[in-house]
Amino acid sequence: LTSARHLDSPRSYLTSTMTDRFDCYYCRDNLHGKKYVKKDEKHVCTKCFDKLCANTCAECRRPIGADSKELHHKNRYWHEDCFRCAKCYKPLANEPFSARDDGKIMCGKCGSREDGNRCQGCYKVVMPGSQNVEYKNKVWHDECFTCFECKQPIRTQSFLARGDDIYCAPCHEKKFSKKCFKCKQPITSGGISYQDQPWHSECFVCETCRKPLAGTRFTSHEDHVYCVDCYKTDVAKKCNGCKNPITGFGHGTNVVNYEGLSWHEYCFTCKKCSLSLANKRFVINAEQIYCPDCAKKL
């Protein structure tokens, strides 16, 4: 900001006390006892000064007469009353101001608004000295730097960016973190993956006894996971032959199903001769199975 040079008495009136005659340089009127202006070493009456010598005001385009106070800045001149901010019209005769390239004069506040950085949130000027946030060569008012999701000011919180959008940490986790298959809440750290689904470690537990299953043998049934013991006891079908659970663990992974009954494949044998009937013709009687030959003998 600069200050205009204020000429309180740019052309102080002089009163002649000379005994010798001296005249106005232009009209030749005698200046004895009269007010006059000394301009470029020439004595000029006020009338000729206003008409022939006065500078033109850069604002109102009228002459700045001998009776007016004049301000000038970089070869431009103003009446004192005309030297005001082009935006708010505040008088600037004794105030700091800025001279813009387009010739406009502005007070410090309006000049800062015109030239300052604009907030990426509200697009208003960020005034020098005001609280603001700078990120990737952009600036926001402190209250305009808000989370894209919850719309709350970030202020001193940590934040993350996705493209041009800013998120507070809780909203970023909620929106972009993987969701646990069990509780549907974000997984912020660690976790377990099973069948391409993410789980919290604390959620990956047996559906029945709640024992953690990470690092242990387990199986799943209808979107629930079970430890081996609970699966055998509460979920697995019972073999109609040996009456033990059909778990699929270890020996006997193949199962034979018939009319709501199930058998281990190795248990699906003729009740009388013990012939294996898997993939063979059989006869069932009172929930017992027989080969055709033994059935004929019954």
Image: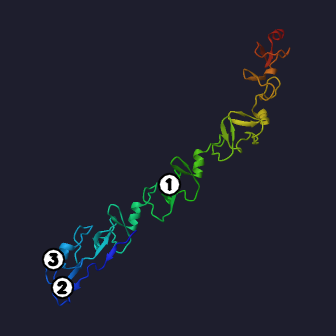
- The residue singled out by tag 1 in the image is 137
Which secondary structure lies at badge 1?
A: loop
Give the label, 3 or 2, closer to the camera: 3
Q: Position of residue 66 (x, y in %)?
A: 22, 77
Q: How many other residues sit within 10 Å of disc 2, few (<14), some (14-19) or many (≥20)?
A: some
* Residue at position x 43%, y 56% in the image: 123
* Residue at position x 59%, y 47% in the image: 174
User: Disc 3 or 2, which lies upstream in sequence?
Assistant: 3
Q: Position of residue 55 (x, y in %)?
A: 24, 71
| Disc 1 residue type (three-letter) | Asn
User: Disc 3 or 1, which lies upstream in sequence?
Assistant: 3
Q: Residue furthest right?
A: 273
Asked where in the image residue 292 lies, by quadrant, the reply is: top right
Quadrant (top left/top right/bottom left/bottom right) for the C terminus:
top right
Mark pair 3, 2: CA separation:
15 Å
Mark pair 1, 2: CA separation:
65 Å
| Disc 2 residue type (three-letter) | Lys
Q: How many other residues sit within 10 Å of disc 1, few (<14), some (14-19) or many (≥20)?
A: few
Could you tell whether 181 is left or right of 264 in the image? left
- The residue singled out by tag 3 in the image is 26
Could you tell whether 30 is left or right of 189 in the image? left
- The residue singled out by tag 2 in the image is 34
Using the image, determine if residue 2 lies above or below residue 15: above
Q: Position of residue 92 (x, y in %)?
A: 34, 72
Choose between 105 and 244: the one closer to the eye.
105
Asked where in the image residue 178 lies, by quadrant, the reply is: top right
